[in-house]
Amino acid sequence: METGVLIYNAQGNLMKLRGTQQGAAHVVQAAPSLSKWVQEGKVWQAIETTATAFVIALPTTTAGFSMYNDEPDTGKWYVVLGALAWQAANAATQASWGIAHQVSSVKPATKPTADLAAATIVKGLRANMGTYNGRAIFDLALSVADDRWAPVSGSVNTVVVSLSGTQLYIPLAVPVHLPPGGVYSVEGIASAVDITGKLGFVWAEVYRDELE
């Protein structure tokens, strides 16, 4: 007698499960593609309006640029897809810089202050999306738990002394998930003082069941 497993979708309809001749199941990713999220107006980009100084030591409890998910407990999750930075000023010597990031392991006791108005730093990645209407809060120099910052990029080397203009955009190989109350932070790390830049990131705002 043959045995099998019955598969039902969220609506209770019986679904067919197909497999290989060796018995392995064919499985597809349930989450929508990134292109679909963009088309639906769920993907955003934020970048600082004013350049800030990159640090020359490993960051600890002070972040450069942070995003806080201010959704209610049943609200949207933020899926961080990439980190980016523009170099605005170079040191008086050849130097290098890169981007580090961290995800706070604890929810802040009080939500951060909105140091930067979302309307001035956020744009959608689908044309004609208009002004950002989400609940993200953007903060500068936020105090965070020292959750072991990690490099998110390699280093960019400046070739000409005192000239700026280098930039980085790094898609995250493993996206960061921020449930309501979660904090994501980035920081620029340089090998010399006087290097400044504008930090940013790209993220999607989706409900929890869209990630299953």
Image (cartoon, grey):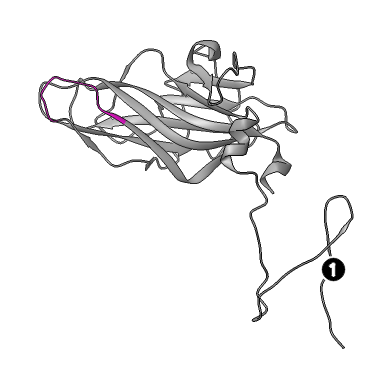
- Residue 181 visible in image: no
Amino acid bearing label 1: Leu
Q: State the residue in front, 59 or 121.
A: 121
Q: State the residue in front, 144 or 51.
A: 51
Q: Residue furthest right?
A: 12
Q: Position of residue 202 (x, y in %)?
A: 49, 31
> Does 157 sit left or right of 43 as displayed?
left
- Residue 50 visible in image: yes
Q: Which residues are magenta?
A: 159-167
Magenta region includes residue 162: yes
Measured along the vertical axis of the image, is residue 8 above or below residue 159? below
> Does 9 sit left or right of 150 as displayed?
right
Mark 1 — residue?
6
Magenta region includes residue 193: no
Q: State the residue in front, 13 or 100.
A: 13
Q: Residue at x 84, y 68 (%)?
A: 6
For the residue carrying disc 1, how many other residues have a C-alpha within 10 Å: few (<14), some (14-19), or many (20+)? few
Measured along the vertical axis of the image, is residue 48 above or below residue 31? above
Occupied quadrant, residue 118 = top right
Q: Secondary structure at mark 1?
A: loop
Q: Residue at x 65, y 44 (%)?
A: 32
Q: Position of residue 92 (x, y in %)?
A: 11, 21
Q: Position of residue 57 (x, y in %)?
A: 26, 33
Measured along the vertical axis of the image, is residue 165 above or below residue 57? above
